[in-house]
Amino acid sequence: MAQSVYCASMSGIIPRSPAELERVSPCDRTSPRDLVSLRDLVSLCDQATAHLDPPLAVVDLDAFDANADDLVRRADGIPIRLASKSLRCRYLLERALSRPGFQGVMCYSLAEALWLHENAVGKDLVRGVDADLLVAYPTVDRAALRALAASDSARRHVTVMVDSPEHLDFVDATLGDGHPEIRVCLELDVAWSPLERGPKIGVLRSSLRTARQAAEFAATILARPGFSLVGVMGYEAQVAGLGDAPPGHPLRAAILRVVQARSVAELTERRAEAVRRIRELTTLEFVNGGGTGSVESTARDTSVTEVAAGSGLVGATLFDAYRKFRPRPALMYALPVVRRPGPGVVTLFSGGYVASGTGTPDRLPVTFWPKGLRLTRTEGAGEVQTPVLGRAADRLRLGDRVWMRHAKAGELAERFTHYHLIGPQAAEQAESETPAVPTYRGEGQCFR
Ligand SMILES: Cc1ncc(COP(=O)(O)O)c(C=O)c1O
């Protein structure tokens, strides 16, 4: 069996320097002109939330909208399916979906998709059309499958992911003989493998690698009562989720660019052939590909009808390191200074908001403001308190805020019940000075 390498751990095959263990604040590699706008942004955040006690999280709607426009520009006419896991906040989902260029939602759980459908998220109110909700990861949630089967309306709009007959068997076993038709999407393995039977660079997801395997499985689905095959999806994480300009790592950047260029070339051919063969068997509503980091290359692939994206709206730190685009930081959080262990260090309350994945330092949050603060190697982002080092620490007083950014776009929503909205448009949202919108957690939802 071929050995596989997770894309996110490609760092394992690409040299890292020990210096990386010390997290650098992005402010420290920011040009003086950008620094001025960062300072303006932080004072806006501070002013807007001065009456609130941190920890708190804010969304800069100006930056969010500008990021949305940039994604649409990069997609160059191909619709963007919004990756809900990277927002996990209904208000932000609706805000993006109301903009031209965004169409449909890529959900991360079936229960979530049903909840979004029930709440008419993304519904086109003018035409009265519900949003198309694609669950991008296979489900074995029997209660959710039964709920899906029981709702004619949900069954028309929700699609579940499959890549093997086992998935179909599971649905049959859960829903029983003669169950109503469930919309399914076939997932293709789009990792890159330099050698046919060698290690793969990409995420470990579908087992359907070749065009022939994909077409055979499509034929299996079409022969099974109770299923309709409506789409094909492939997420090239090795391009979409790995920045090709990691700062301070020219060798890693060079290797990554070669890997990504070859992967795109290989995938364009293989995906086109798989889609061509499946289209010979049935009509597809969509072929979805990519993510924030691959919008350009995925949109250029003529077999693809839509690209997925979400993180690019928020500008999390893992997306700071791409050459082709640079999202503005739209989501930040503030932690309060609660004590001073000594010169050049203050301790913040809370803060252990570490991103999922490889467990490498790039998953840690970064200090955003004041400039020149960093996490310690020994404590990182702490469970209930987080020391930060740097000269700026000596200018901070108890109760002052340190602004941070998360490495990933959606996971902060699991830590905060509300996001405070800032920017000129925020005032339109509510009568209060700083309107706040609930995250999924704030609405009592936890889709795990
Ligand atoms: C199937 C799928 N498509 C697209 C994405 C990209 O999402 P984003 O643009 O938020 O990084 C992901 C992220 O993990 C994914 O799993």
Image: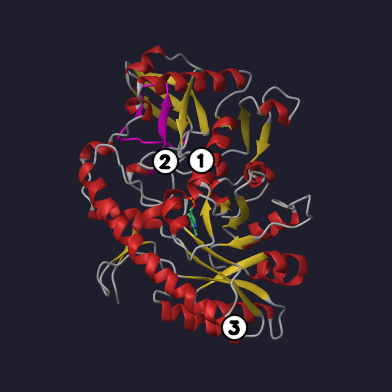
Residue 346, given in percent of the width and then of the height, sits at 39, 21
First in sequence: mark 1 vs mark 3: 1
Q: Is residue 118 magenta?
A: no
Residue 297 bears which disc, if any?
Answer: none
Residue denoted by label 3: 222
Instruction: For residue 365, say whether it is visible.
Output: yes
Residue 31, given in percent of the width and then of the height, sits at 35, 24
Residue denoted by label 1: 70
Instruction: Give the amino acid at mark 1.
Output: Asp
Q: Tell me which residue sits at (42%, 27%) in the image.
A: 368
Instruction: Give the amino acid at mark 2.
Output: Phe
- Span of residues in magenta: 363-384
Image vertical order of residue 213 relative to residue 22, above or below: below
First in sequence: mark 3 vs mark 2: 3
Position of residue 102 in the picture relative to residue 209 (left or right): right
Whether pointer 3 and pointer 2 mark residues with C-beta atoms closer than 8 Å, the reply is: no
Residue 238, given in percent of the width and then of the height, sits at 36, 56
Image vertical order of residue 224 relative to residue 26, above or below: below
Whether pointer 2 and pointer 1 mark residues with C-beta atoms closer than 8 Å, the reply is: yes
Q: Tell me which residue sits at (55%, 82%) in the image.
A: 281
Some atom of ligand 1 lies within 8 Å of the CB belonging to the residue at label 3? no
Q: Is residue 367 magenta?
A: yes
Q: Foreground: 99 or 30?
A: 99
Q: CA distance from mark 3 to mark 2?
A: 40 Å
Whether pointer 1 and pointer 3 mark residues with C-beta atoms closer than 8 Å, the reply is: no
Q: Tell me which residue sits at (35%, 35%) in the image.
A: 379
